[in-house]
Image: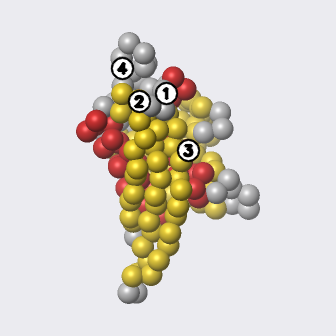
Amino acid sequence: MVNEEKVIYSLPGVYESLEHTGDVYIRVRGRSLLDLFEKSGLALFDTMTDIRKIESKIEKEVVVEGFDLDNLLYKWLEALLVIYYSENLMCGSIVVDELVIKRVGEELSYVLKGRACCEEFNPEKHEARVEVKSPTYSLMKILKTTDEWIAYFVLDI
């Protein structure tokens, strides 16, 4: 059962981990969509380690395309997670450079381009928290309020 009111953990200014029975339920707030996607990526990595201890030694370009904002968020988190699993890199800083929405025939396509600043995971330097298997569509939603964007998503651990 999910209780959106109970915050389990937070990294102030970045995200809050909310109560969830078996996985990690995240709420992220951003001033813009670009900020929201940056902070969502940081929440992913901070779930696995303390991102404040990651040095920006290696920069990785990340480009994803989705058919709506939820799909784009899923693919964004998935692409960032692939960086960890394929290269053992943890990201402590993420910059989204561009969000393009274009029409392809009768459909819309959302393209997100950004950079992840990473460091190789070192268990002697970086605290091991939980291993994230993948993002999920469970409880995923992106909302726009008067003055901010809010994303909710679950990470399968």
| Disc sitting over residue 104 in the figure | none
> Label 1 to label 4, Cα distance in Å?
11 Å
Q: Earlier in the sequence, mark 1 or mark 4?
A: 1
Residue shown at 59% from the left, 31% from the top: 10
Q: Secondary structure at mark 3?
A: helix
Q: Earlier in the sequence, mark 3 or mark 1?
A: 3
The type of colouring in the image is secondary structure
Q: Amino acid at mark 4?
A: Asn
Q: Secondary structure at mark 2?
A: strand
- Specify the farthest residue to the right: 146
Residue shown at 59% from the left, 58% from the top: 33
Q: Secondary structure at mark 4?
A: loop
Residue shown at 40% from the left, 52% from the top: 62
Mark 2 vs 4: CB contact within 8 A:
yes
Q: Earlier in the sequence, mark 2 or mark 1?
A: 1
Residue neighbourhood size for the residue with mark 2, other residues' Cα within 10 Å, grouped as few (<14), some (14–19), many (≥20): many
Mark 2 vs 1: CB contact within 8 A:
yes
The x and y percentages for residue 39 are 55, 44
Residue neighbourhood size for the residue with mark 3, other residues' Cα within 10 Å, grouped as few (<14), some (14–19), many (≥20): many
Q: Amino acid at mark 3?
A: Lys
| Disc sitting over residue 122 in the figure | 4
Q: Amino acid at mark 1?
A: Glu
Q: Is residue 65 left or right of residue 148?
A: left
Q: Which residue is mark 1?
A: 55
Mark 3 vs 2: CB contact within 8 A:
no
Q: Nearer the viewer, residue 72 or 102?
A: 102
> Label 3 to label 4, Cα distance in Å?
23 Å
Q: Which residue is mark 2?
A: 119
Q: Which residue is mark 3?
A: 39
Q: Nearer the viewer, residue 128 or 55?
A: 55
Image quadrant occupied by the C terminus? top left
Q: Amino acid at mark 2?
A: Glu
